[in-house]
Amino acid sequence: MSMISRRTFVSSAAAIGATAGAIALAGCSGGSSSGSASASSASASASVETASQSQSGSASSQPATDLSKSVVVFFSRAGENYDVGVIDEGNTSIVAHSIAGKVVSDVFEIVPEEEYPFGYDDCYARAKSEQNSNARPAISDTFDSFDDYDTVYLGYPIWHSDLPMIMLTFIESKDWTGKKVMPFCTHGDSGLCGTDQHIKSLCKGADVKEGLAIKGSDAQAFGMDVDKAINTWLAKVRS
Ligand SMILES: Cc1cc2nc3c(=O)[nH]c(=O)nc-3n(C[C@H](O)[C@H](O)[C@H](O)COP(=O)(O)O)c2cc1C
């Protein structure tokens, strides 16, 4: 599988070995998946990575035709994860930066105030507890310039067959009226799990497009199949 160059170096997680696959992932039904190819960025003023920063070294294989101001907002976690071992950059972050390079958009990373555990099992347990208690984990930066953007590419990992609760913290803190929202996720094997529909119900007044789902291990390997899945999805949701 040929490799696509991208902005951030990612260590060879596969070589380290997947130690985190022991816990079965929750399945789900009803999730549509348009792309089944199955860095920490920033910090208030430094939190938004501008388009020129996200462009450097990325593969911009698709010309930007969308003249609206767009931003890629994502949550992702490095460390030990399902099916990929220990990774330096989260799976969703890789897809987020690829999208940002292709559509020439700014990037905002949702960074939790309290970092999630490095270990998969510990993170799995905390995420489950947050879901059970309907928590809204705090985000370290409020992204005050959010209103300047009219197109939002919204990325996240599937956690327990749904959005990580911190995505709800972010979504509920913003006014989505009139925005175009393009959801994308990475996952262990479950696809979108209906999260694009969940986002539709949360982002009141937004035009929420069909979601993209990329398997996390595929995002880490980032071959031609993933690149193509992203391009195909972008062509569809931007038309
Ligand atoms: C807490 C937790 C819960 C997860 N739950 C699911 C799940 O229900 N279904 C699934 O397919 N993958 C699940 N996964 C796997 C992640 O969705 C997958 O590894 C994803 O690519 C991680 O993205 P990230 O590296 O950007 O955080 C889970 C992973 C974690 C850490």
Image: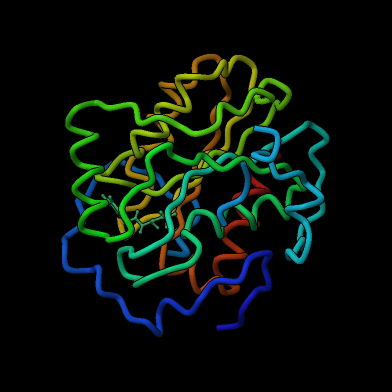
- 184 up-or-down from 172: above or below: below
**Picture coordinates of residue 39, whole percent (x, y):** 57, 57
Quarter holding ligand 1: bottom left
Viewer-closest of 75 and 24: 75
**At x 78% / y 61%, what residue is drawn?**
56
**At x 65% / y 74%, what residue is drawn?**
4
**At x 61% / y 79%, what residue is drawn?**
3
Viewer-closest of 211 and 221: 221
- 17 up-or-down from 113: above or below: below
- 221 up-or-down from 194: above or below: below
**At x 54% / y 39%, what residue is drawn?**
154
**Picture coordinates of residue 133, whole percent (x, y):** 19, 27
Viewer-closest of 215 and 239: 215
The quadrant the C terminus occupies is: top right
Coloring scheme used: rainbow
Give left or right: position of 69 versus 187: right
Residue 30's image quarter? top left
**Picture coordinates of residue 228, whole percent (x, y):** 61, 64
The quadrant the N terminus occupies is: bottom right
**Picture coordinates of residue 94, whole percent (x, y):** 56, 60
